[in-house]
Amino acid sequence: MVAVRYQTAFQLYPYEKVPEQTAQMAPVRHPVVIVGGGPVGLALALDLGKKGTPALVLDDHDGAGLGSKAICFAQRTLDIAHRLGASSPMVEKGVVWNVGRVFHGERQLFNFDLLPEEGHRNPAFINLQQPYFERFLVEEIRAAQADGALIEIRGRNQIAGLEQHADYVTLQVDTPDGPYRIEADYLIACDGARSTLREMMGLSFDGRVFEDSFLIADVRMTADFPTERWFWFEPPFKDSGQSALLHKQPDDVWRIDFQLGWDIDRAKEMNEDRIRARVDAMLSSQTGTVPDYELVWTSIYTFQCRRMQSFRHGPVFFAGDSAHQVSPFGARGANSGIQDADNLAWKLDLAVNGLANDVLLDSYATEREYGADENILHSSRATDFMTPKSKISRTFRDAVLHLAAKHSFARPMVNSGRLSMPCAYDGFALFGPDALKGGPAGARPGAPCPDAPDGNNFLLDQLGGGFIVLSIGGEAAPAVSAYSITAAPVHIDTPSDILRKRYLGDQESAVYLIRPDQHVVARWASFDEAAVGTALAKAIGKG
Amino acid sequence: MSVELNPNLPDPDGFYDELLQAHTGLSDTESEAYNARLVLIMANHIGERETLTRLLDAAR
Ligand SMILES: Cc1cc2nc3c(=O)[nH]c(=O)nc-3n(C[C@H](O)[C@H](O)[C@H](O)COP(=O)(O)OP(=O)(O)OC[C@H]3O[C@@H](n4cnc5c(N)ncnc54)[C@H](O)[C@@H]3O)c2cc1C
């Protein structure tokens, strides 16, 4: 039996019986099994498949879940999706907004215009319903399969049991045709916040529960309504709680959040008339008239900020919500999960090809645990600003809001969620020297490469996949190898002004070693084969 | 910048008086709110992140 826990928005990988399910057969060993076909599991499978490593995804449903989940996808996620060949339909479908307004009670405190920073292929973020994000990943997986990538997604395959051995895992899988068993050299748990794998392995998931409930209403309205983000502290509409948020998604749908507090009567709050009364009050607050709209989806959610102590347990890796959970403010859930996949894919690919050691595999855990801590910190700070936990914290919060209306200095302190930014692995073991005097901080070792225009294209188009030796200005650097791994050369003879600013600072030339996940390993003023070779060895845990 | 904890303020009595007068007529809650705004404005004026950490320590 495979229970259906939720409705799907799109059916993407219908159940099909596979030969392995024949009872007599001994369990088949797969190099990589990914449990969970959410954004993280799909991105990981696509990345592995494109690198030539087989990936089997098992999901207990057969498509993207319906309902209100992620809508805000940040630039780093789009850059990773671009590397995977899946970003074009996302950016095309997604909504970009620039103007935001912040209200306190009846009063508009200030507005801002996020003028896009030039010289990036992708916008700072887009709003796009999560089911579309998953669908576009699956469509690219289908295209990769047609090109020979060994990716397989098995829908309605639910993990019912797990047996861990020193260097592989045996899984018991339930299907509509009954159970079967498979084996995995590496098992990646991308099975979400309620991870069954985590539970089966008896691993804890500790953190902080925020005592608050949020009502989400996705409404469809074709009325002319500005594409802006509106955020209220202490909204003036009746019974609307501590804060409220309105922003736009594709298909004329608007996401509305009301922060209702902890002691609420859920059934009562889900009453349609009651929800409509709140939505009416919000939508008419600036114009006095209620536009026509349709309630597409409503739900109430609460959240926690927590993470597993370790993201790796022998052959089992945890990625995405199964490993860490944050509040939705700042859109860090799926965005950070995609960075997990980005970090893990190339390390697993090397492992499957016999080229990785435990140091490299462990670095996935240490690097992404750090990423999770950073995300939890930012999202806890936003939550503490939005919901002051003591009298004095409310006093300071209100002081900031009061001042923000009058003085621009207080506006950067107003925190209704900070946009997800990728983390830089400063000081982590697998990174090398920063030997470029006065090199720009944005491209320091540990940081993800900033994008920049290059001819009619963008720099990031040429980075990633494998290791890269990037030489800018000066002489073209050659390929460098260490332990059977080769960093391929990319040379930029005449850098654009923006590329110069982001990579050279006031230097005339530079040489960068870049990881397959587009993070900078090390950089120098000029090419030195021994130095690059040493850094490459270090980057794969053999330094 | 190191934190100045020796006398540094001209006219200390006059400043103290002005500070109290700023609170005249305010309820306790309003006074608290006023103080919070004052701290934030002063912090921004100082504008040096490490100095602020030292000031926070010194006030304990
Ligand atoms: C209201 C709300 C708003 C949000 N907004 C944002 C946002 O704007 N930006 C953002 O980045 N994030 C946002 N998030 C977070 C985001 O939705 C999650 O971080 C994201 O879905 C995590 O992806 P995942 O692949 O790790 O897990 P999931 O998306 O949870 O996928 C897990 C998959 O595993 C499957 N599965 C589970 N158990 C089993 C099993 N035993 N066997 C087989 N399959 C199994 C599930 O069916 C599911 O398909 C939001 C979340 C909420 C609730």
Image: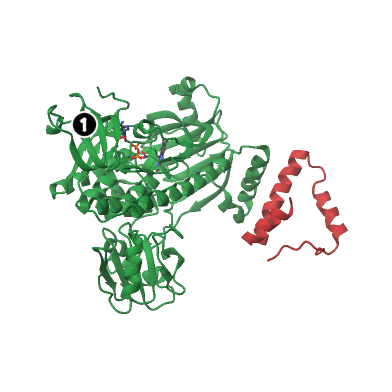
Chain colours: A green, B red
Host chain of mark 1? A
Q: Secondary structure at mark 1?
A: strand
- Image coordinates for residue A376, horizontal then vertical, percent: 49, 44
Q: Please tell me which residue lies in front, A76 or A236.
A: A76
Residue A528 vertical placement versus A336 (above, below): below
Residue A342 vertical placement versus A457 (above, below): above
Residue identified by numbered label 1:
A181
Quarter holding the C terminus of chain A is bottom left
Q: Residue at x 62, y 59 (%)?
A: B49
- Image coordinates for residue B21, horizontal then vertical, percent: 83, 50
Q: Please tell me which residue lies in front, A146 or A131.
A: A146
Left or right relative to A169: residue A307: right
Quarter holding the N terminus of chain A is top left
- Image coordinates for residue A360, horizontal then vertical, percent: 34, 54
Location of residue A394 by image quarter: top right
Circle 1: is it few (<14), some (14-19), or many (20+) Cα within 10 Å? many
Left or right relative to A478: residue A28: left
Could you tell me how many numbered marks the image carries?
Answer: 1
Q: Quadrant of ligand 1?
A: top left
Residue A401 vertical placement versus B13 (above, below): above
Q: Residue at x 42, y 28 (%)?
A: A299
Determine the residue located farthest toward the front in the rendered image.
Answer: A166
Left or right relative to A106: residue B7: right
Q: Is residue A498 visible?
A: no
**Looking at numbered disc 1 in the image, what kind of residue is underneath it?**
Arg
Q: Is mark 1 within 8 Å of ligand 1?
A: no
Left or right relative to A517: residue A324: right
Q: Residue at x 38, y 70 (%)?
A: A523
